[in-house]
Amino acid sequence: MSWMNAVPVLIGLILSPLLFGIINRVKAWFAGRNGSPLLQTYFDVFKLVRKGMVYGTTTSLIFQLGPALVLTSVLLALLMVPFGTMAAPLSFKGDFILLAYLLGVSRFFTVLSALDTGSSFEGMGASREVQFAALGEPTFMLGALLMAIYTGEMSLSGMVREIHFEAVGGQSAAVALLVAAWMMLLLTENSRIPVDDPNTHLELTMIHEVMVLDTGGPLLGMVTYASGIKLWIFSALIANLLVPNLHAGAVTQGAVFVAAVLLIAVVVGVVESIMGRVRMRQIPKVLVGATALVATGLIMTLAG
Amino acid sequence: MTEYRPEYRNVAAVPLKDIAQSEMASFRTQVQERVAAGGLVLSFFGAPIDMEMNLICVIGQAETGALHVFRTAVGESYPALTPTIPQVHWFEREIAEQWGIRPEGHPWLKPIRFMQRAYNGKNILSADGADVQVGVTDYYSMEGREIHEVAVGPVHAGIIEPGHFRFQCHGETVFHLEIELGYQHRGIEKALVGGPHKRTPFFMETLAGDSSIAHGIAYAQLMQALTGTQASTRAEYIAAIALEFERLANHTGDLGALAGDIGYLPTLSYNGRLRGDYLNMTGLICGNRFGRNLVVPGGVNFDLSPDTVSELKKRLDVIFRETRISVDLLWATPSVMARFENTGVVKKEDGIALGWVGPAARACGIEVDARAHFPFGAYREIKVPVASQESGDVYARARTRWQEMENARTFIDTALSTLPDGKVRADVDVMRKGALASNTLVVSLTEGWRGVVCHTAITSGEGRFAAYKVVDPSFHNWFALAMSLRDEQISDFPLCNKSFNLSYCGHDL
């Protein structure tokens, strides 16, 4: 491991808030508006961290520590995400399980902070978040299993080194199903349309946003930044499946990879622009559908 | 059957002596018979007439276009009508709140506006006769280990009016929603007594700011009836054109907002702009986008020049075509239809029993429209078809609004093309002493974009307002929203709410 391995992580840290800017600009373009600046999330985070703290009177230490723990767990998770052909700084057999559960830890503390406020809204949001996360988990795990079986590798970095278009060949259908399923997972995990609507002000319809209604100032800054990183992690995982090995220099390869990640943000923006949210009751069907897709891919891999 | 049953038309001035004061028992029978015959209670209120408290009930019979007015003297209390006529439940709560008259046997007697005390100082809605505190009252509640209560408002996350909503939930499912309003109570009805004052027209146009024209016309018609003035046909046409533009603007905005509530951006964005275009057309007519100061007793303040007429036609043509494209996106997008259909379903029989009005009622098959059934102004000459749907869900309410927009467009086209000549304003000074007929009652109905607007005025012996009762369509329909949430997902509340889009200030007055 050299200092070079730190570069992808740095790029993730720097560029992740940009994803929200891109999504919002795409949505604005569809709506015929100018939209907020590309760098708006940076401004927001910068503004929030300079603010003072206000805590609800019903909250305890858990609420105050929550956002820091959330941010820490997603930052740790980021260390395990490979960057195209470049291996992740932290890579070992079975790292994908740790990745999944670090994200689980971040969710756990988000939920705990939400419940700590005692607000009926936040409790409702926490209940929804946990329900849908449980249904999303098989999609991630089966996807990782698919890659492991196909590549014979047990670490994420090893897997993505082997999965690129020229190598995939006959299995491209299985990988395509995996990409589709993980895209749905990305939309769910990052509370995007059609599962959740990050821009709504309607507390009763929110899933993720409602859990941080009582959070403000630097804590909200941390939560916002953490959600940017989380979106980056999922986008990067999918980009890893899409970007071929160009056998080019690290800079070119890296640039293509970053472009792919940003392109995924564009796709998210397009999806949000052309469809509405599904009814809350129907969300499990979406998630089970994603699991079915990845399971089909898995069967194809096993049979092929 | 009672034999004496006078019928009046919309905006007829009736001398009070012609409205016989019935005994309470006979009053109840008459009201019950009219309601049983399909009548809609348009207004039911207490008013002091000649130092004596009266209950006055105005019932509209859509089939015949007849209005019935019944009155009876009342003391401290009377047997509530609500148990047999559910549609008066809100009216009876209002009577109890405004006059301290107890409707005995009312199933859920509590304030609707949190007035501190009744006009006459009585207070029967707090335990010990103390002042009613805002927001402090009994709420319907359920018990059980898995039941949870969610309280929303009165301060909301968006820039909207205040109202308090309490949901009794089991998981995501709502068993019951209770709506508490009154946070916008301005005391307008009280301020109108003794009028008309200089401020009266301004009160009228801001009863519900998005229905300025509807309330403006209702007031103007009423004053014309009281002063014996006739507005010219041209003036009536211009007022009706403005009323339809108001309908177009609000329905456009609401269809966009419905899309916004489910995160469907295209229609949200386009309709936001198109709503402004319709408001601008109203602005073109009178210089104010909400049509303030356009409709006045005696006619309208602004005439339409031939240039304005052709400009309006031209703009309407373009804007409406764009609106159609934007709204058609809703019906053509599966993810939108999946949310609209079977969400917030209300039943026709509930609507009839509870007396719902406007597009909300028509969306479940209750075809009542004051323009068609109690025609006024230009609607006596240009007929508007009654838009309606059967399913009573969010889709039906959206679709009904779209039908009404198509009808409004046709109406405006026709009215602009057949605009009669003449003066647009008759000279009438409502402030002049003796200008208004004394001891007279007038009921004036218009069909605003939310439904029927009912103004009832009673003049004193000096020809001033002894009572002025305003019933905004929201007053009838708030309970429809509560009904639409029964067994619905709590996450669909905003969508259901928007599909009715009721007025808080129009209710709170």
Image: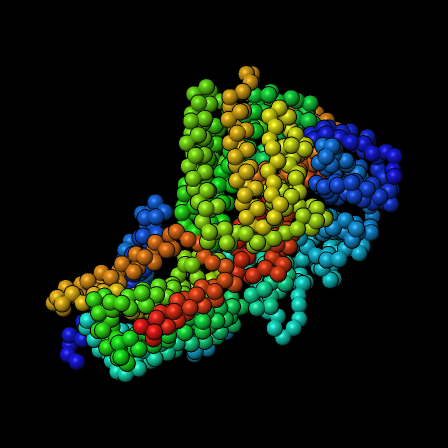
Horizontal side of residue A208 vs B380, given as left or right: left
Q: Left or right of A249: which side holds A110?
A: right
Q: Is residue A106 left or right of residue B84?
A: left
Which sits in the foreground, A229 or B215? A229
Q: Is residue B274 visible?
A: no
| Number of numbered discs visible in the structure rendering | 0
The residue drawn where x is 15% and y is 77% is A3
Q: Quadrant of residue A151?
A: bottom left
x then y, percent, for residue A262: 26, 60
Query: Is residue B465 or residue B364 the one in the foreground?
Result: B364
Specify the farthest residue to the front.
A303
Please, which colouring scheme is shown? rainbow
The residue lying at 52 percent from left, 36 percent from top is B405
User: At 72% from the left edge and 29% from the top edge, which residue is drawn?
Assistant: B9
Residue B354 spot, x, y in % from top left = 70, 49
The residue lying at 48 percent from left, 75 percent from top is: A116
Q: Is residue A85 above or below residue B416?
A: below
Task: Specify the quadrant of the image occupied by residue B27.
Answer: top right
Q: Is residue A86 visible?
A: yes
* Near-viewer residue (A88 or B438): A88
> Where residue B402 sits in the image (x, y, percent)?
52, 40
Residue A131 at what x, y percent from top left?
Answer: 48, 71
Left or right of residue B438, residue B274 in this image? left
Quadrant hosting residue B42 = top right
- Viewer-proximal residue among B331 and B106: B331
Query: Among all residues in the image, which is located at the extreme left?
Result: A249
Location of the C terminus of chain B (image quadrant): top right
| Quarter of the figure that contains the N terminus of chain B | top right
- Residue occupying the far bottom of the picture: A93
